[in-house]
Image (cartoon, rainbow, N blue to C red):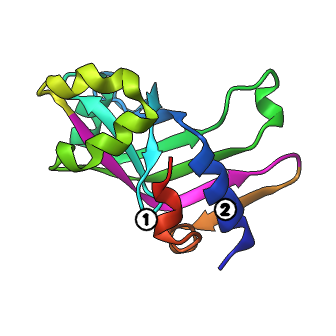
């Protein structure tokens, strides 16, 4: 198991917001970025809650390829660590199973659960880019990322 995968996975677990990039359907061939809260599931896959009418949802339905950059806000954004998960997004059928944990992390999202057009999507990693600081830049294979931390460690908020 890669030490970089462990380091990156722990870093990502502490992040709560990121930028989701999808392939635009409206402006074909261009990326479309959107700020989104996320959490990691017990396998280390990012989970996002998005609306059916959102631009990024329409994009994901047409092409599931996406990336999610995870980085805490800082005065010097270039000087902080960051993780980019590149993968495939798929909708999850059961909003109720993940809801309580998601609301622990994002209580302000409670109103979204009353709306029927919001649902969870899971990003299955294909590859991960970890920048842990100046000169500490590594590609991490999905298998190393998914095996980097015991599943129970990611369940705690």
- The answer to whether marks 1 and 2 mark residues whose Cβ atoms lie closer than 8 Å is no
Q: Which residue is mark 1?
A: 43
Q: Which residue is mark 2?
A: 139
Distance CA(mark 1)–CA(mark 2): 19 Å
> How many residues crowd around disc 1 within 10 Å: few (fewer than 14), some, or many (20 or more)?
some
Q: Residue 76, relative to residue 90: is it above or below? A: above
**Residue at point 15%, 50% (across, down):** 93
* The N terminus lies in quadrant: bottom right
- From the viewer's side, name the closer residue of 59 and 97: 97
The image position of residue 112, as x and y in percent, is 24, 23
Name the mark on residue 104: none
> In this image, 114 relative to 123: left or right?
left
Q: Residue 67, relative to residue 75: is it above or below? A: below
**Residue at point 41%, 55% (across, down):** 41
* Residue at disc 2, secondary structure: strand
Q: Residue furthest right?
A: 134
Q: Is residue 33 visible?
A: no
Magenta segment includes 132: yes
Q: Residue 94, relative to residue 77: is it above or below? A: below
């Amino acid at each position: 198991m890669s030490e970089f995968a462990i380091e990156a996975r722990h870093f990502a677990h502490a992040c709560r917001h990121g930028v989701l990039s999808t392939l635009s359907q409206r402006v074909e061939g261009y990326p479309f970025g959107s700020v989104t809260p996320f959490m990691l599931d017990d396998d280390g896959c990012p989970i996002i809650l998005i609306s059916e009418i959102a631009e990024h949802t329409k994009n994901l339905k047409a092409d599931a390829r996406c990336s999610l950059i995870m980085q805490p806000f800082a005065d010097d954004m270039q000087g902080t660590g960051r993780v980019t998960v590149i993968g495939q997004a798929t909708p999850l059928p059961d909003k109720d199973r993940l809801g309580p944990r998601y609301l622990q992390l994002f209580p302000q999202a409670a109103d979204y659960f009353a709306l029927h057009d919001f649902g969870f999507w899971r990003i299955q990693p294909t590859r991960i880019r970890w920048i842990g600081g100046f000169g500490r830049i590594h590609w991490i294979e999905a298998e190393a990322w998914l095996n980097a931390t015991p599943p129970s460690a990611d369940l705690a908020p």
